[in-house]
Amino acid sequence: MSDSKHGKWTVSSSEDEDDDEAIPLSGTTTSGPPRPASPPGPKLEPVTASVEVKPEPSAPPAASSLAVGSEARQSPLTNQLNPVKFETSPSLAGKRKKEPSDGSGWALSDSDDDGGDDDGDVKRKSLGKKAPPSPKKRKQKVETERPPSPYGRVYIDEPEDFFESSVPCLDDTYRFYLNKVTGLDKKYNSGALHIRDILSPLFGTLKESVQFNYCFDIAWMVKQYPSQFRDRPLLIVHGDKREAKARLLQQAAPYPHISFCQAKLDIAFGTHHTKMMLLWYEEGFRVIIMTSNLIRADWYQKTQGMWMSPVFPRLPEGSGEGSGESPTCFKRDLLEYLASYRAPELEEWILRIKEHDLSEARVYLVGSTPGRYVGSDMERWGHLRLRKLLSAHTDPVPGEERWPVIGQFSSIGSMGLDKTKWLTGEFQRTMTTLGKSSLRPDPPLHLVYPAVEDVRTSLEGYPAGGSLPYSVQTAQKQLWLHAFFHRWKATATGRSHAMPHIKTYMRASPDFTQLAWFLVTSANLSKAAWGALEKKNTQVMVRSYELGVLYVPSAFVRTTHGPTAAVLRVLSNREHLQSNAWSSLFRT
């Protein structure tokens, strides 16, 4: 166990170190008692018989949405309906080791250390030498070492004015939006979107749709569609196999308008983690690339983000093969990404997209698809794809060695025994690329991840940790990572207490008012998501499907003469919350 200048660090005990959610595939349920959550905070041990559990509410809200999703998602949400009285549990107090006195840092919890009050009490009882501590002393100890969360009990219903009743005033320049968060002051949800807003008739008359995602609650998802669109054909693209796939199909049995496409996952530990909507309207076609799973918890009190395209119109009859392309080649890259699934179910959508004009897209697509790639194919996916785009479409900035690289994510994978194995080697080389210069300055690298106190005081309370997995086994092998950590804070958008499931990467100016580039994506900090070089850097291996969009200044400068701007202004003249969010989604 080691300390850094950022304090000690608590990690969860999930076992899959490369999986984004580090949890079983979507639709998983358990037949036995729910397993405690694995938040990035104090480690919850299995509940013992001595723990007093409050009775389940007679009519628990949103019961259907709590019963689905991955096992790690189910546990914290189920615990909201069956909250544990921490003060009566000796086991919870005994497992915590050396937390910071102020409770604000990253405190390491060792799953291999069994010398706590649990074993001590059992041994003393069996030997009959010493009575257990009084209930009062236990209560004081638990409250001191691990104060209860003030929030996170049950879902609350959104107010009537939470959803849009007219076309909202949105930022049409960058088209980057945050999700609405239940419980925030109304001003912080201005310009943000909920899934019900996205699917409403205000944005188009829906004919068909596709939902690409990792985790689904089918019944909840269907209810987010307006009643007049709930029987429209819906294709679900997922990565579930065997039992998990059977459970997913069983969820959809009452909905004959739903069909499925299973993404091929041929490499171990890979996931279908892409989160995208394709919406075909009578008026045209729209793409949404986002960070939210299709479960209520992800659209409730978490910080999430998305890029939402304009409505792309249909091309005139007789248009040529390359018609409707954008300056960022978005149409070509989207078609290439869909073709990588090699799925007959997507062929109709590929043909449909070819018939539409996507020329208004101003972002670059950055995707990952499973496979091992050599030669020029190495730059098609993952972080090498991002490196290629940054080299071709950004420019060096004065004093760039002082412009930090910032990564913000909700899950961490295995990166090796030291920082040079992947993070500061190939991955940081990608993130520091600006133009074609061969110079590689060594700017600061800030990695943003919530601490124990952030989770405890979040709107969801400790259950928020179920969406922030980091294997304790992996963490103990890469203690060097602690030196890069910075805590989550989002004051300007009112989301400091809405734990992040959003994933963003950027190159910011020293005063955080300008960006050399900005990426919102489904990809967390892992080799599975971004890819890793193999065979003396002659091959790259990618495990998972991921998708995001890259903003670069040159794509937003419409001029035919003179130099292009090298940076994006974080605060636009209108000072949209969405633009402001870029500078406020982290604290150094």
Image (spheres, grey):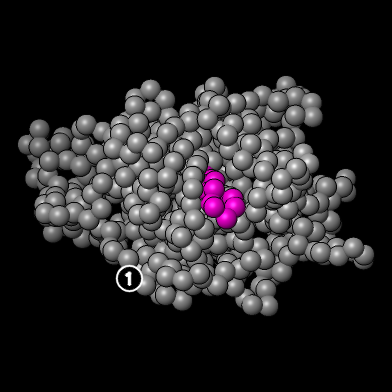
Residue farthest front in this picture: 317
Check if residue 213 falls in the magenta segment.
no
148 relative to 479, above or below = below
Res. 276 visible in picture: yes
Where residue 294 appears, as percent x and y from the top left, is: 41, 47
Query: Which corner quadrant of the image does residue 121 belong to?
Result: top left
| Amino acid type assigned to the residue bearing label 1 in the image | Glu
Left/right of residue 376 with respect to residue 370 in the rendered view: right
- Decide which of 21, 578 is in the foreground and name it: 578
Where residue 453 appears, as percent x and y from the top left, is: 40, 60
**Residue at the (40%, 51%) spot, across then down:** 229
300 relative to 332, above or below = below
Where residue 215 appears, as percent x and y from the top left, is: 41, 40
**Residue at the (22%, 44%) spot, across then down:** 91
**Residue at the (57%, 69%) spot, across then down:** 170
Residue farthest left in this picture: 128
- Decide which of 282, 269 is in the foreground and name it: 282
Query: Which corner quadrant of the image does residue 425 belong to?
Result: top right
Where residue 408 appears, as percent x and y from the top left, is: 57, 53
Q: Main secondary structure of the magenta part?
A: strand
Residue farthest right in this picture: 561
Query: Which corner quadrant of the image does residue 259 belong to?
Result: top left
Q: Mark 1 points at which residue?
A: 160
Q: Please state the extent of the stretch shown in magenta in the rendering.
A: 275-286
**Residue at the (60%, 26%) spot, across then down:** 342
